[in-house]
Every structure is written in structure tokens, then in C-alpha cells.
Image: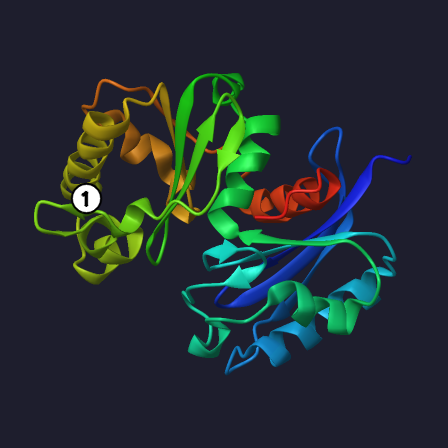
């Protein structure tokens, strides 16, 4: 089998990596997970990434997601990782521990979007599609006919006088102990604003709470269809592996 890639998904609590069958989106062998170092400085995270690649005995290109805006290979924000990431040249950082191989570093929600386009709902390949990951915040991926517009930050858009993610993330649901019904009303408010401004053909809802999609997606009242993400926890790793295989370098 030659159509194999390798992806690593850097999260606030864990760093996960796996070989990926790029024709099916399935993992090859076991996923490797190591707890995110604290503090999650660039150097500490890079060392953990190198350990995962070494454990996997992988010598090819590596795709890596980080919870940050990445432009020209440089991290411009830092969400759930150490603030010292801001201004870090990610390509240089990871090349320092992974050596002379192709490396692609991209935003974690963008990676999830790429994975869903290829292995999720077929409608994700057509028209304007917005993927949203509901977690600590609200991550987003904008897709036009399956092509990524990188680094959208829709969770930070002002909706009803507040940042969308401040009141409609799944963390807000947990923090305020909201029922699915009350939280769905907040999500609906956010989606209605995105709908008014972007006129998407489809919303894809990701993040851990998408596993309970039947409890809240049917309560939404927007005109645009809303479907749960299909890859769930695989999305970041699969999207990272696809990105480097496709020579995507935001």
C-alpha cells in the first residue's frame, strides 16, 4: 500500500498521531497518544511530536494541526497552548526535530474540514460549506466546492453583542449547566447570523458534542441543513495527513 500518510493532532490535553490510509480515511495500526506537556511551549510540544513519529517508525512527510491561526508557517494566535506560540515559525520548529522531510502545519478546525470534505457527507464537496467544532471555543473551517479558505475565526465573530463562542460553545453549555434545548437556542442564534452573512449550503457540526447530535441538532431552526461531522476524533489526524500529502501550506 503506497497511499499512506501521517498526521498529528495537537490538542490542549493530548497530542495524537497515526498512519492514515488516504484512500479511506481510516487509521493504519494504533493511534499513539501522549499527554500535552505543561506548559505547552513550542519546544516541549515539538519534542512530543518527535516522540510520536519515532514510536510510529514513520520516515515520510508529516502533517500537524495546532489550535492556532497559521499563516506562512507562522502561528499568529495560541488557543489552549502556551502564549509563547504566537510568532513561532512552526515549519522551522518542527524541522528542527523531524529533520529533512515535508511538513505541513495548519489550524485544527481547518484540518477537520479537509477530512470531512473527503470522507464525510458528500454535500461537503459542493458550494459554500461551514464546519464548526464546538468545544472550549468554536473552531471553524470555510470550504468552497471542497477547497479550504484557511484560518477563518468565526467563533470570535460578535453575535448579539458578544463573541459567539463565549455563549454558544460546548464549554459554555457545561459552565452554565444548560439543557440541550437552551443551548441549542444559543447555537441557533449563531448559525442564523452566519447564515445571514455567508449563505452556506451546509453546516457541519463537529467537536465532542456532535456525538450527541440527536439531542440538539433537531432543535435548530435555521434554513440551512445541519449535519453532524462523521469523522469525530479522527478528523484532525486525517486532515493533517491529507494536508501534507496535498502539499497544503497555509
For residue 162, above or below residue 11:
above
The quarter of the picture where the N terminus appears is top right
Q: Residue furthest bottom?
A: 39
Q: Which of 141/14 is in front?
A: 141
Q: Residue furthest left?
A: 161
- Asked whether the viewer can see residue 232, the reply is no
Q: Quadrant of residue 16?
A: bottom right
Q: Position of residue 9 (x, y in %)?
A: 60, 56
Q: Quadrant of residue 226?
A: top left
For residue 185, above or below residue 221:
below
Which residue is located at x 69 percent, y 34 percent?
A: 25
Which residue is located at x 54 percent, y 63 percent?
A: 74
Q: Classify residue 233 as left or right of residue 207.
A: right
Q: Position of residue 73 (x, y in %)?
A: 59, 58
Q: Position of residue 190 (x, y in %)?
A: 20, 38
Which residue is located at x 37 percent, y 22 percent?
A: 202
Q: Which residue is mark 1?
A: 183
Amino acid at each position: 500500500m503506497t497511499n499512506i500518510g501521517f498526521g498529528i493532532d495537537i490538542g490542549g490535553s493530548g497530542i495524537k498521531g497515526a498512519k492514515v490510509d488516504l484512500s479511506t480515511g481510516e487509521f493504519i495500526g494504533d493511534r499513539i497518544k501522549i499527554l500535552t506537556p505543561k506548559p505547552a511551549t513550542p519546544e516541549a510540544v515539538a519534542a512530543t511530536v518527535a516522540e510520536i513519529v519515532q514510536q510510529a517508525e514513520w520516515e515520510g512527510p508529516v502533517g500537524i494541526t495546532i489550535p492556532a491561526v497559521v499563516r506562512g508557517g507562522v502561528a499568529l494566535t495560541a488557543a489552549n497552548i502556551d502564549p509563547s506560540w504566537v510568532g513561532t515559525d512552526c515549519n522551522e520548529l518542527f524541522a528542527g526535530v523531524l529533520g529533512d522531510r515535508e511538513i505541513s502545519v495548519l489550524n485544527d478546525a481547518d484540518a477537520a474540514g479537509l477530512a470531512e470534505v473527503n470522507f464525510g457527507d458528500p454535500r461537503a464537496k459542493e458550494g459554500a460549506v461551514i464546519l464548526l467544532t464546538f468545544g472550549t471555543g468554536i473552531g471553524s473551517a470555510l470550504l468552497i466546492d471542497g477547497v479550504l479558505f484557511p484560518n477563518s475565526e468565526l467563533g470570535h465573530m460578535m453575535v448579539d453583542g458578544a463573541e459567539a463562542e463565549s455563549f454558544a460553545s460546548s464549554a459554555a453549555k457545561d459552565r452554565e449547566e444548560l439543557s440541550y434545548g437552551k443551548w441549542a437556542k444559543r447555537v441557533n442564534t449563531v448559525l442564523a447570523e452566519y447564515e445571514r452573512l455567508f449563505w452556506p449550503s451546509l453546516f457541519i457540526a463537529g467537536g465532542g458534542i456532535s456525538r450527541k447530535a440527536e439531542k440538539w441538532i433537531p432543535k435548530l431552526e435555521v434554513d440551512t441543513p445541519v449535519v453532524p461531522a462523521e469523522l469525530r476524533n479522527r478528523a484532525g489526524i486525517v486532515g493533517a495527513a491529507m494536508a501534507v500529502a496535498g502539499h497544503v501550506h497555509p
